[in-house]
Image: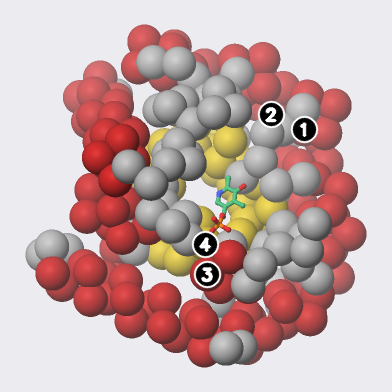
Amino acid sequence: MGIAEALQRLNERIHEVCLRVGRDPGEVRLMGASKFHERDALEEAWKGGLRLFGENRVQEAERKFSGFKRDHPQVELHMIGSLQRNKARAAAALFDCIQSVDRDELITELGTLTLERERPLMVLLELHTGEASKAGYPDVEHLFRATERVLSFPNLKIQGLMTMAPFTEDKEIIRGSFRALVSARNQLQSRFPGRDWSCLSMGMSNDFEIALEEGATLLRIGTALFGERRP
Ligand SMILES: *Cc1c(COP(=O)(O)O)cnc(C)c1O
């Protein structure tokens, strides 16, 4: 199956699950998690209609997307991997959104780097909900403080939260992880009303249907779209 066909099937599946659980499919975005896939794969996905891509490493994203962005200025590119402080400048220049904001010092770095520019940088705060790598803020109290810090910078625009569920066959553990993200979002919404908390980035190839059932608005799909990653 080619990438365009895989994309079409995923969109159909998203549509079906949304209708089954009474959600509007129009509120769900599909991101192509394109790590380790090269320009030919990106082009194929683009031709199939994909406009949102996510990358894990700044250098790899620069190499692959600087030319791609010139040719397709409408592309939207998000950072979804762990971001080191010394790569923050390059990341702020390349990405439209940093989904993996997981430390206050990173917020300060990104906020300072974007002080003088006109275009805001979108950010999601990452919550750790059980995945093994331990990436993400540990709890809602930390998210409250992180949000205050984000709001203190004029060109950082909060849009919601991101998480990764643990790699397990146990659906209830995965569901629990997504529910923890929704619960955190609801608490942030009451603490910081009037801000945009609409983006819930959760769900990957193996668990996106559960994520949709629990309220995901952005799915990060790699393998089910591009095929197995070359190591
Ligand atoms: C690779 C990756 C994905 C996509 O994973 P698949 O299981 O291949 O769909 C999603 N989110 C993050 C943060 C990733 O690193």
Q: In this orientation, which residue lies closer to the viewer: 46 or 89?
A: 46
Q: Residues within 10 Å of mark 4 (few under 14, many from 20)?
A: many
Q: Amino acid at mark 3?
A: Ala
Picture disc at residue 110: 2
Q: Amino acid at mark 2?
A: Leu
On the image, the x and y values in percent for residue 154 come to 56, 29
* Mark 3 C-beta closer than 8 Å to ligand 1: yes
Q: CA distance from mark 3 to mark 2?
A: 32 Å
* Mark 1 C-beta closer than 8 Å to ligand 1: no
Picture disc at residue 224: 3
Q: Residues within 10 Å of mark 1 (few under 14, many from 20)?
A: some
- Above/below status of 71 relative to 206: below
Give the mark toward the camera: 3 or 2. 3
Q: Quadrant of the C terminus?
A: bottom right
Marks 4 and 3 close (CB-CB < 8 Å): yes
Quadrant of res 39: bottom right
Q: Is residue 85 left or right of residue 76?
A: right
Q: Amino acid at mark 1?
A: Ala
Residue on which disc 4 sits = 221
Q: CA distance from mark 1 to mark 2?
A: 6 Å
Residue at screen point 45% across, 16% down: 138
Q: Secondary structure at mark 4?
A: strand
Does label 2 or label 4 sit earlier along the sequence?
2
Does label 1 or label 2 sit earlier along the sequence?
1
Q: Is residue 170 left or right of residue 163?
A: left
Residue on which disc 1 sits = 88
On the image, the x and y values in percent for residue 62 come to 84, 55
Q: Quadrant of the N terminus?
A: bottom right
On the image, the x and y values in percent for residue 117 come to 71, 40
